Amino acid sequence: MASSKLTRREFIPAAAALVGAAGGGEVAAAAELPRELAAAAARMEPYLFPQSRFQDVSRGNPIPHRLSEERRREVGLTRESWQLEVIPDSANPATLARPLTRTQGTAFNFDALMKLAEKHAVRFPKVMTCLNIGCPLGMGIWEGVPLREVLWLTQPKENLRRVFYYGYHNDDPKQMFRSSLPISRVFEDPFDLPPVILCYKLNGEWLEPQRGGPVRVVVPEAYGFKNIKWLSHVVLTNLFYANDTYGEQNNDVDSPLKTFAGLLDVPASAKAGTSIPITGWAQCGLGGLSRVQTWVRPVNQPWPDEDPTFIGAPWVDAHVLSPPTSWGVDLPGGRIPPGTHGFHDSGAPKQWPMRLTKAQWAALLPPLPPGEYTIYCRAIDEKGHAQPMPRPFRKSGHAAIQFTRLVVTA
């Protein structure tokens, strides 16, 4: 389907959860916006999410972050007790000179990770979203050590085509959730992408258990299911195909983040003759983001069946907001740390909007006569593809055109 209706029951809790305190979304270009729109933009959620504000779609029974601290310590889910095994696949083994295992006393621990971090630590911005959910789970600056630095410690020799990995799953094989990557993506970063990392910090703070701490995988261009929490095992394999758990659930496990826009704050009703400020967010996928557009359609206006994605609709450009003057979390000196991928050392982004992150947008709808209307939004990527193109298929990532209703009264 081309459209994804945001029902009032879904929209109001979503907006309440996402809209921050006044000033949280302060933008550099607020003075360039109409007064009514600047006020709406100032009420938007912070650009970066504190860890406590990330939405949680964790798996497990019980969910590992809900275990007692004592139990988490026992099973290796604290920084002091964490150990990572990097081993060959028993069924399709890669040849390793030095596997990292608990039984041999060579498992990789947090102190060793911090030692590697002294030389190899990287930071990059990334929006975390779910393949099948049309809203952000969170946006942050992720910090860690490239996974390849740990894989090289095993001295791989041959027969290595993929890597798969999984986290703690309550010692229950039926609860295992596994993701995988081609080994080329781990060893090399194409198209100026940041590396795949073993992540231990988010927005400069230790990764909390609810966010997958002490260590999780973060894949910059990937949806959440590739970013395994509570990492415990990395398996090097000669398999030539993906073996992700998500693949068994009819999902496309190789699609990178799509570009699409979503609604955030739209009033349920408005007075005739008044301008109507609305706000939203956009996921800047691998294709980047050039524009966000809105469209107001009377509910009784028919639309031709041969244009299900509304290509011929009278779309109007919205304002994509400039980089915020306040990022929304406590960063050292209030600035993005020097050396963060995608930023100058001054803290200014090299490109805006940045790929693989979120953008915020606002639009001022014109005065409307009394009636009932449908409000739509869509994104257009840097190659001119209008949402839901170029990948309209749901299983390769959410991209449906979002809409909601608005009642204008006399």
Image (tube, helix red, strand yellow):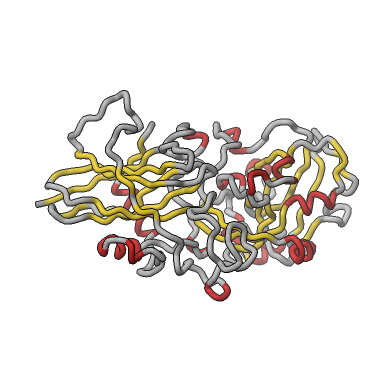
Residue 54 image offset from top left, x and y in percent: 50, 58
Question: Hey, which residue is sitting farthest left in the picture?
Answer: 410
- Answer with left or right where residue 230 lies relative to residue 330: right
Eyeballing the image, is 22 above or below 56?
below
The answer to whether residue 112 of the structure is visible from this angle is: yes
Residue, x 67% and y 34% (percent of image)? 242
Residue 325 image offset from top left, x and y in percent: 45, 68
- Answer with left or right where residue 148 lies relative to residue 275: right
- Answer with left or right where residue 64 lies relative to residue 317: right
The answer to whether residue 14 of the structure is visible from this angle is: no
- Answer with left or right where residue 26 lies relative to residue 302: right
The image quadrant of residue 207 is: bottom right
Residue 23 image offset from top left, x and y in percent: 38, 69
Q: In this orientation, which residue lies closer to the viewer: 341 or 71?
A: 341
Question: Hey, which residue is sitting farthest bottom in the picture?
Answer: 333
Q: In this orientation, which residue lies closer to the viewer: 125 or 113?
A: 125
Eyeballing the image, is 310 above or below 187?
above
Quadrant where the N terminus sits is: top left
Residue 83 image offset from top left, x and y in percent: 76, 58
Eyeballing the image, is 335 above or below 357?
below
